[in-house]
Amino acid sequence: MYLELFKLKELPFRLSPDPQFLYLSKAHARAKAYMESTIWFNDGFVVITGEIGSGKTTLIETFLREIGPEVVVAQINQTQVSAIEFLQVVLAQFGFSPFKMKKAELLSTLNNFLIEQYAAGRKVLLIVDEAQNLGMRVLEEVRLLSGVETTKEKVLRIILAGQPELNEKLNAPELAQLTQRVRLRFHLSALSADDMRAYILHRLAVAGSQDREIFAPDTFGPIYRYSGGIPRLVNTLCDTAMLAASNADSALVTLGHVDEAVEELQWLPAETRAAMAAASGRETMMMALPHHASQVHTQTAVFGSQIPLNTPTPSAPPLARLILARDGQTVAERGLHPGRLIIGRTNGNDLQIDSRFVSRHHCQILTNAEHSVLEDLNSTNGVFIKSNRVRHHNLNDGDVVTLGEHELIYIDERVNGRTRVGDTGRQQQPAEPERDEDLPD
């Protein structure tokens, strides 16, 4: 890596949450104070929301490092579970072996544990990250748990952290009783341009820069333009720019290195991504092409030609096909027309894979008359072809793409002239997804 060139003791822009690197902007400091309030108040119930990569998990890890031994904590990160599985996971966090218990026994055990901890002078805190994935029945269990109390006070403190959809879910009429129990709600916004600059310098200082100039002054504007102030995206762009500088044997990251990183990552400016997401009716973090590519709001330049976004011609056959499989069984099939197909866990994607191993927006495939290209959208668990993790890959006929427990088989209809742009004919209808019996309710 580039540590020796930049005289750093550790990587400054890793994506894993590390409290040591936490930069407390005003918004982050306020969110952390709200988390701490769950310990101060007898009825502590706080909801923290923020965009993907805004720093929620790092705040949680920092908060957990600072609380004392008088607080007993259950931290839940896997939220695609049924109501019974949720109660089992909570009890397992408290040291029980609950996986053969039925619901009545689970609730009785948990209630008794909470009362015992209160009697011993300890506070009990439940933290749920990625809480936007909790089902309505699980959230109802959270409401019931929040109501466990002695004659004087509640005995369970709760922090729910998640993406903005969590707020939408909590605002549903059927969750009105739960929402009434929430003491504080806060949305963690992106960093401002000034905060982003301070954030970058802070991380460099923690990594051992000793106030040496590593990023040229004119690089911060473009970094903000393309990252939108989202910490995870700032990390990705800065790390890639440092790699570009390292490849050029330069101990200073220049504007040219940032441009090279943007081109490698194939990003559009943050404002353009937001406009595209608004136009399509989705909240997506779509990564696209470098700033020097020709672009309009409804089209993106790919491979030197203009392709529309998600605008297949109904009468035209697909240029390629994707077969989604799990355990050797076909789950779904999608035709690829000129444009973009986004794959992820939530139902706002063009191809939804309801799996705990798939990110909200995991990857995308860009197709034109000649090629289809696979791009990782900064997913947590990655995209693999032949056991190799890839971020940008020109798909070939027969490629098998692994996403967690699922496989995407790519079939190029253009091979041997099977399909040509301009051909007409009946479009094959995609197969209806089968229910995955292994997925929780």
Image (spheres, rainbow, N blue to C red):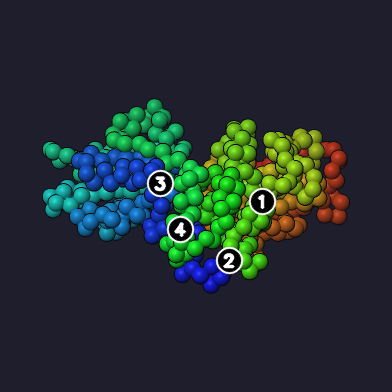
Residue 250 in picture, x, y percent from top left: 62, 66
Q: Nearer the viewer, mark 2 or mark 4?
A: 2
Query: Does 12 sit above or below residue 286?
Result: below
Q: CA distance from mark 2 to mark 4?
A: 17 Å
Residue highlighted by disc 2? 251
Which amino acid type corresponds to the residue marked 3 in the rendered image? Ser
Mark 4 secondary-structure assignment: helix
Query: Does 425 sit above or below residue 58?
Result: above
Residue 203 bears which disc, if any?
A: 4
Mark 2 secondary-structure assignment: loop
Q: Which numbered disc flags the more N-terminal residue, 2 or 1?
A: 2
Please tell me which residue lies in front, 299 or 123.
299
- Horizontal placement of 93 versus 308: left or right? left
Q: Which numbered disc flags the more N-terminal residue, 3 or 2?
A: 3
Labelled pair 2, 1 in contact (Cβ < 8 Å): no
- Horizontal placement of 25 versus 366: left or right? left
Q: Which numbered disc flags the more N-terminal residue, 4 or 1?
A: 4
